[in-house]
Image (cartoon, rainbow, N blue to C red):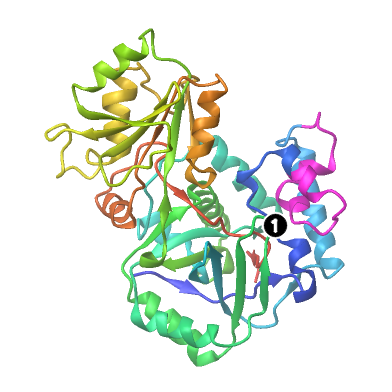
Amino acid sequence: MAKVKPFRGIRPPRELVTEVASRPYDVLNSDEARAEAEGNPKSLYHIIKPEIDFGPEVDEHDPRVYDKAVENFRAFRDRRWLVQDDAEHYYIYAQTMNGRTQYGIVVAANVDDYMSGRIKKHELTRRDKEEDRMKHVRINNANIEPVFFAFPDNDKLDAIIRTVTAGEPEYDFTAPDGFGHHFWVIDDTDMIQQVTEEFSRIPYLYIADGHHRTAAAALVGNEKAAQNPDHKGTEEYNYFLAVAFPASQLKIIDYNRVVRDLNGLTPEQFLKSLETNFKVEDKGTEIYTPESLHNFSLYMQGRWYSLIALPGRYDDSDPIGVLDVTISSDLILRDILGITDLRSDKRIDFVGGIRGLGELKRRVDSGEMALALALYPVSMNQLMNIADSGNIMPPKTTWFEPKLRSGLVIHSLDD
């Protein structure tokens, strides 16, 4: 059963939150972070992307950059741009996008739950990316940014969320990207106990987004346990920062593909080859959006096409084989276009659905890409079924939006 605890969050004073809070470290590059933080010494980018305090010639993995993160984190606390709460709390963090709000509970999740598989994953992680975040956690002795979890719906936790969010939020602002962020502190001791107890009845938590951050946080906690001869299991390093949302509130958006060439085929030959496994229908020049599972949208030479996978071309009983990302990867990208490794092949690129299908059209019309392929989004049920089965999703399958805003609360591994 899931083990979580409240913690003494380190957070900005209410009047500074919009200056401190930032996008996550991994959704923008160093130059973009440098531009966003320009003129704002309070931006969290100075801690999570501290290379911005150096010239562009300094690599983001330079040891001086990690040292700068520690220096800046200490300075933020000394200047009281970040202040630690006196008591342990849970927090409610809500996000609003396009008129829809989702409500998560900010918790300290348990390292052993990750190591034992009670926190389930659906993606592979890369060791180099894990090590980068591990260094950041180790050197700051804190989880500066949260990870994004889902949990099976729970009526009692829903009731607690409704009660808490009926009150005035601690933070309530709209970020530059137009997404709303709302944050409440749970300070009632009985309610805090109820949150702990209800999570203890939930068998599994699911990583929605942030697999590398989760792995890094858990591995550092595990390291600290191994290094402590008096380890008891109750130390703060046994926990890491997470925001857990009821699964029914989360919506995965599409994650689409653009390809540079037709692998030596003419457009006519390519369309003809698709007919082996798909019903192909010309939809004209207006943007066509996939309408259901196994329906794909193809854009090429100024025209949109509907592709519907024919019966028998996929296995509904296979949680991986039934995914549209698998069907398109096998029957289009591999068999026709010769793309076998989505992680390394330079002929393919990926576009998050938040950018819209107009971005696919733009990249093809510019001549940069030969075709674009839009997919119907994966469901939370599919994600959880795959995690439950112990399988791993193919690369670039899920895109969650809005991203968690960093800097609303930080978890110290000391206390």
Quadrant containing the C terminus is bottom right
- Residue at x-position 80% and y-position 42%: 52
Compared with residue 89, is residue 391 higher up or lower down, i.e. above or below? Answer: above
Magenta stretch contains residue 46: yes
Residue 387 in the image: state x and y as whole percent.
31, 51
Q: Which is nearer the eye, 52 or 275?
A: 275
Compared with residue 216, is residue 298 higher up or lower down, i.e. above or below? Answer: above
Residue 315 in the image: state x and y as whole percent.
15, 38
- Residue at x-position 45% and y-position 25%: 302
Q: Is residue 240 visible?
A: no
Residue 238 in the image: state x and y as whole percent.
52, 64
* In this rendering, position of residue 405 left or right of residue 59: left
| Residue matched to label 1 | 176
Q: Is residue 349 visible?
A: yes
Which region is colored magenta? 33-58
Q: Secondary structure at mark 1?
A: loop
Question: How many residues crowd mark 1 within 10 Å: few (<14), some (14–19), many (20+)?
Answer: few
* In this rendering, position of residue 302 left or right of residue 312: right
Q: Which is nearer the eye, 380 or 225?
A: 380
Quadrant containing the N terminus is bottom left
Compared with residue 340, is residue 229 higher up or lower down, i.e. above or below? Answer: below
Residue at the extreme left:
312
Q: Amino acid at mark 1?
A: Pro
